[in-house]
Image: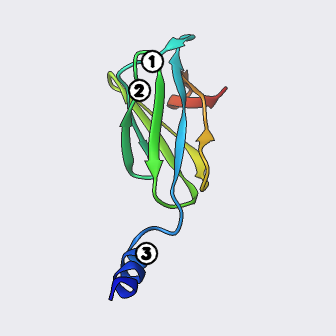
Amino acid sequence: MRLAIAVILAAAMPLAAGHVLGKITFAGRPLGGARVTVCDNPGTTDGDGAYRVVVPNTGACTITVVHEGKRAAATVHSYDKPTAYDFELVQGRGGWELHRR
């Protein structure tokens, strides 16, 4: 019975989970208090601009940063091990953009 429950629970869990983490800056300074979404999983930057979001599945997805009316997105990849992405929020020609640092 215990083995059957363990198999059912294991089947219900994602195959891999990792963390996407890094720092967000704006005008060369840490961007604290920004909302960060990675692969539809929410997070927030701390006072140093650092974020860490648990992502239950591996693969390519979108990171979105929103702060004081500024919104930008970029493609990132989630792996079964922590993956770091540092970005600078900059004004682009068509709006706000995330530039990888």
- Assess whether mark 2 and mark 1 are in contact (beta carbons under 8 angstroms): yes
Circle 2 sits on which residue?
45
Kindly identify which numbered label has been placed on residue 31.
1
Q: Is residue 2 above or below residue 71?
A: below
Residue 48 in picture, x, y percent from top left: 47, 16
Q: Foreground residue, 91 or 15?
A: 15
- Mark 3: secondary structure: helix
The residue lying toward the viewer, choosing from 17 and 90, is 17
SS label for mark 2: loop
Q: Amino acid at mark 2?
A: Thr
| Amino acid on which disc 3 is placed | Ala
Apparent side of residue 10 relative to residue 24 in the rendered image (left or right): left
- Residue at 37 percent of width and 37 percent of height: 43
Q: In x, y percent, where is residue 81?
A: 61, 50
The tally of labels here is 3
Secondary structure, mark 1, is loop
- Give percent across and percent down for residue 12: 38, 75
Residue at 39% of width from left, 52% of height from top? 40
Distance, label 1 to label 2, CA atoms, is: 7 Å
Specify few, some or many for label 2: CA neighbours under 10 Å numbering under 14, 14-19, or 20 or more: many
- The residue closer to the viewer here, 40 or 48, is 48
Whole-number angstrom distance, CA of label 1 to CA of label 3: 38 Å
Residue 58, image x, y percentages:
56, 60
Say which residue appears at 47% left-offset and 21% top-offset: 49
Please say if 55 is above or below 69. below
* Residue neighbourhood size for the residue with mark 3, other residues' Cα within 10 Å, grouped as few (<14), some (14–19), many (≥20): few
Residue position for label 3 = 10
CB atoms at circles 1 and 3 under 8 Å apart?
Answer: no
Residue under the image location 43 percent in, 75 percent down:
10
| Residue nearest the viewer, comparing 56 with 101 | 56
Report the quarter where the C terminus lies.
top right
